[in-house]
Image (cartoon, rainbow, N blue to C red):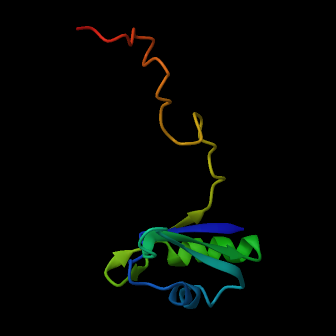
Amino acid sequence: MKLYVGNIPHSLTEQQLAELFAAYTSISVKLILDRDTNRSRGFGFVEIESDDESNQAIQEMNGKEVEGRKLVVNEARQKERRSGPPSGGRSFNRDRDNRDNRRRY
């Protein structure tokens, strides 16, 4: 089962996150980094082999204090698909809210 781990201190490394979950049979650990600054975005994912161990990790690690921050640990959800243009914004030629976009002088 894949677990979401949030509210991670920004100073924590992927190796340290793996050490926090060392008591469980983890398959993979991924700390999400900002692509521009290469710093932690404050969340990551831990994949644990069995559902029983995953549920135990949620019970034991959710709310655990690490460097003054309480971790949020729960089952990861599927990433939601975003709608709209791939650029993430509006097209320059698209009417906004069906308004008339002609310039008025």
State the residue in front, 74 or 46. 46
Q: Is residue 92 above or below residue 60?
A: above
Residue 6 seen by the camera = no
Locate residue 62, reporting x and y percent. 49, 72
Q: Is residue 14 above or below residue 87?
A: below
State the residue in front, 26 or 91. 91
Residue sitting at 63 percent across and 90 percent down? Answer: 23
Locate residue 98, reporting x and y percent. 45, 11
Residue sitting at 66 percent across and 53 percent down? Answer: 78
Is 68 on the left or on the right of 20, as rendered? Answer: left
Quadrant in the rendering for residue 103: top left
Hey, which residue is sitting farthest front in the picture?
A: 105
Q: Give the position of the N terminus as an image quadrant.
A: bottom right
Residue sitting at 62 percent across and 60 percent down? Answer: 76
Q: Is residue 7 above or below residue 97?
A: below
Residue sitting at 38 percent across and 77 percent down? Answer: 10
